[in-house]
Image (cartoon, rainbow, N blue to C red):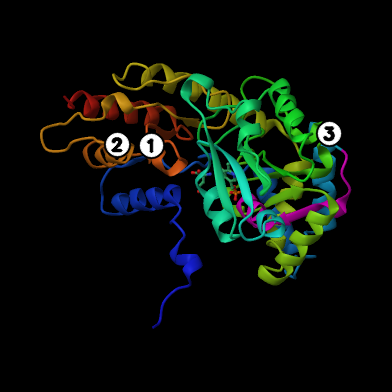
Amino acid sequence: MLKVSDRIAAMELSPTLAMSQKSREMKAQGIDVINLSVGEPDFDTPDHIKKAAQKAIDDNYSHYSPVPGFLELRQAVVNKLKRENGLDYTTDQIVVSNGAKQSIANAMMSIVNKGDEVIIPSPFWVSYSEIVKLAEGTSVFIPTSIEQDFKITPDQLEKAITLKTKAFLFSSPSNPTGSLYSKEELRALADVFAKYPDIVIMSDEIYEHINYVGSHESMAQFADMKDRVVVINGVSKGYAMTGWRIGYIAAPLWIAKACGKLQGQMTSGASSIAQMASVAALDGDQSSVVSMRTAFKKRRDLALSQLKEIPGFEIREPKGAFYLFPQVSQLFGKSNGSVTINNATDLSLYLLESANVATVTGEAFGAPECLRLSYATSEEQMAEAIRRIKSAIENLK
Ligand code: PMP
Ligand code: GLU
């Protein structure tokens, strides 16, 4: 029989991208949908970065780059890690890929054997569990609640570790919760890892620049952890470059080499033009990073105050990223007469159909009592979206 592999059959479609596609289709039909589903900056890529790409084209950057990326870009990453994070890496520890998503997949494929366990704090970003599946590993989720600001405790971590634990994968700032771990909280988790030297820590720092409370804290800052931390980052979020598809890892040499080996057979490396644009992003003027963050913070504050007015939405202030993640379980069991809301997926569909606002069900992130709204959209659009959500919710009895 002609059919796809078990590997693909077992995999879920990316729900964030699927919801975004659905709202694109509704828009194409002339429906006025406000898309709060996908998480990507709505800003244009800053001009100096676009100019660098134009120059790269004119300078004939039209050939394959080295598999792990141009030395110039890897040096720019090394400089960035030193300048912004105080971390020392060499260029051979950096591997540039087609977005942080591929960086995570490369690293996972490089370290996980069939049956190995990967610990993931939940709620988690949708692709983590599917990437673990692809590597034939098993995800072990640590549940968290809104009361603990969706962050795990050292005790929870220790209880989740088994002889099969191979890796720990988390994001801070977090997608979808917007929570971030302080230096002290990371150190407390590191104290647990110190007892288990064979666990690799995959630290997804893609939202590093969208942090409203202070400096970014990386697990790699601890000398006793650094040689088993894979720092995952990229230009997508901080520089409004999602479509350019450039991410990278900074990792122990054995992992960097393995990722390069895999990438050499899978993609040959990332786009040469996008790589040169990324050099300009990392080396160039950083003022757009600051102005975008300021705009996101203003939107968060506005959206948060408006969302708090919605009955049945329990919410706390996210400290980073650009998502609101209200707990909406108080609405379960309510109905507008024809539709009954039994879970967050029902609510997300109800809001899409009756309010024409696209959100993502918390189910996709391992939190079936929550809903994710991205506020990477204009203040006017966000205010209008919340008005629509409010009136749709008020129709539920
Ligand atoms: N990690 C997290 C937590 C994300 O939200 C995203 C956004 N899609 C990624 C990784 C992947 O980013 P990129 O666009 O660089 O692949
Ligand atoms: N990080 C974004 C999100 O969570 C992008 C979509 C994706 O890559 O899944 O919406």
Are there few (<14), some (14-19), or many (20+) residues within 10 Å of tag 1?
some
Marks 1 and 3 sit apart, C-alpha to C-alpha, by: 40 Å
Q: Which mark is residue 153?
A: none
Q: Secondary structure at mark 3?
A: helix
Q: Kindly identify which residue carries mark 1.
A: 368
Magenta-colored span: 88-106
Q: Kindly identify which residue carries mark 2.
A: 343
Numbered disc total: 3
Left or right: 64 as drawn, with respect to 389:
right
**Do the CB atoms of the residues marked 2 and 1 lie less than 8 Å apart?**
yes
Q: Closer to the N terminus: mark 2 or mark 1? A: 2
Q: Which mark is residue 83?
A: 3
- Does the image show residue 36? no
Residue in the picture at 62% in, 25% down:
153
Please state which amino acid type lies under the numbered disc 3.
Arg
Left or right: 64 as drawn, with respect to 123:
right
Q: Nearer the viewer, mark 1 or mark 3?
A: 1
Quadrant in the picture for residue 308: top left
